[in-house]
Amino acid sequence: MNVTVKELSGMALGLPTRSRALLADLLLDSLDEGSLESNEAAWFELAKRRDAELDKGTVGTKNHAEVMAAAREAVRCAT
């Protein structure tokens, strides 16, 4: 079977919420490559990069109300 990532993601997003959560868990488990130390280092580098972006003003922030409204909208659209 030769399916593109776009096609596969479209099919996955069409699944019920619980099925998507189970699929996400399986996919995350499959990424369990490398050591804990290398994963932590990667997350630390990402955090440093995002902090630098905030300092430079190339990205913005959202307050709690904005984040919660976006999350509620995402859940409403997904069900």
Image (cartoon, grey):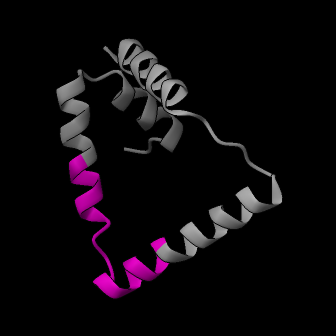
Residue 10 drawn at (x, y percent): 44, 28
Residue 32 sits above or below residue 71 on the image? below
Q: Residue at x 28, y 53 (%)?
A: 27
Q: What secondary structure is the stretch in magenta mostly built from?
A: helix
On the image, which quarter does residue 36 sit in?
bottom left
- The answer to if 59 sits in the magenta stretch is no
Q: 13 or 52, which is in the foreground?
A: 52
- Image quarter (top left, top right, bottom left or bottom right) of the C terminus: top left
Residue 73 drawn at (x, y percent): 45, 16
Q: Is residue 19 among the parts visible in the rendering?
A: yes
Does 14 sit left or right of 54 as displayed? left
- Image quarter (top left, top right, bottom left or bottom right) of the N terminus: top left
Residue 14 sits above or below residue 21 on the image? above
On the image, which quarter does residue 77 sit in?
top left
Does 14 sit left or right of 5 as displayed? left
Residue 67 drawn at (x, y percent): 50, 30
Q: Residue at x 39, y 78 (%)?
A: 40
Does 47 sit left or right of 50 as displayed? left
Q: 43 or 26, which is in the foreground?
A: 43
Residue 37 drawn at (x, y percent): 34, 87
Q: Residue at x 45, y 41 (%)?
A: 3
Does 60 sit left or right of 30 as displayed? right
- Magenta segment boundaries in residue numbering: 25-43
- The answer to if 32 sits in the magenta stretch is yes
Q: Is residue 4 among the parts visible in the rendering?
A: no
Q: Residue at x 44, y 45 (%)?
A: 2
Residue 54 sits above or below residue 31 on the image? above
Image label count: 0
